[in-house]
Image (spheres, rainbow, N blue to C red):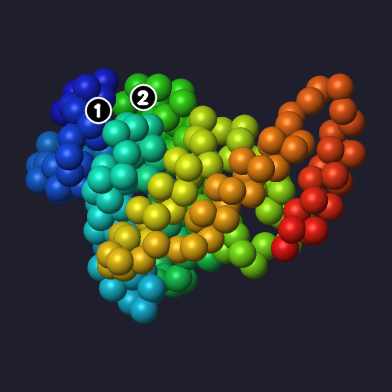
Amino acid sequence: MDCSGSKFKAIIHSDRPGKKLAELNEQKYYDCLEELYNLKEVSQPEDGHPEGDAWRHSLLVVNKAAQLTLSAMVRYAALLHDFGKQATPLKARPHHYDHEKKADTYIIRLSRRLGVLPAWEKAALTAARLHMKGHYFPKLRPGTKVDLLVDINNSPLSFEQFCQILLADAHGRGRAAYEPIYLKDLINYGNKMFEIYPENSDIDAQKLRVDRCNWMAGNL
């Protein structure tokens, strides 16, 4: 694979990107996909991840994402969502506390090497940073929910696309029949909040957040 990313992009656009990535000759392509290959043998808690290591999980996630959407951007973000796990010290594994805060360097490095579109990189950063909050959406405080929805809205991802990544993540843990109810809630709250309280430069930002938080609290 030349690191311009043309072969990688062809893989992402395929029906089963994870399968094709698994079939690549690692020795030949390691220099181009170092951060992805570094997920191999990154252990995860067996109760939450019966599928195996972070590499196996990521391949299953991108395969599911490919079933859910034709968007290469969403597929790319799904593939990279757990990149922060490679930063977890060996003594702390298989747990990966705060891994969502550690992915940026790896995502940016891979994205720049492959020359992917800036929107792909931003979508991957968003997925990595926010996917854990997304999965805990029902338990978040109103203000945290508002901030999460604003961050998603400010990214290249729609609420629907963000939730496609969350669903693919859930399926990548071997939960093939699992479709969290909270995904629909996240989409509905996001779309409704911006319908009632759209972004408006004429409105004080602090007041806008307070209004959104009060609205969110009143709808829980």
Front position in the image: 16 or 53: 16
* Along the line of sight, the residue nearer the viewer: 24 or 146: 146
Tag 1 near tag 2, CB within 8 Å: yes
Neighbours of disc 1 within 10 Å: few (<14), some (14-19), many (20+):
some
- The spot of residue 174 in percent (x, y) is 28, 67
Give the residue displayed 76% in from the left and 36% down from the top: 197
Can you tell which quarter of the image residue 16 is in?
top left
Badge number at residue 116: 2
* Residue depicted at x 57% and y 63%: 136
Image coordinates for residue 213, horizontal then vertical, percent: 80, 51
Secondary element at tag 1: helix
Q: Is residue 161 above or below residue 89?
A: above
Q: Quadrant of the N terminus?
A: top left
Residue topped by disc 1: 9
- For image coordinates 66% across by 43% down, the residue present is 192
Visible residue check, residue 27: no
Instruction: Residue type at mark 1: give it.
Output: Lys
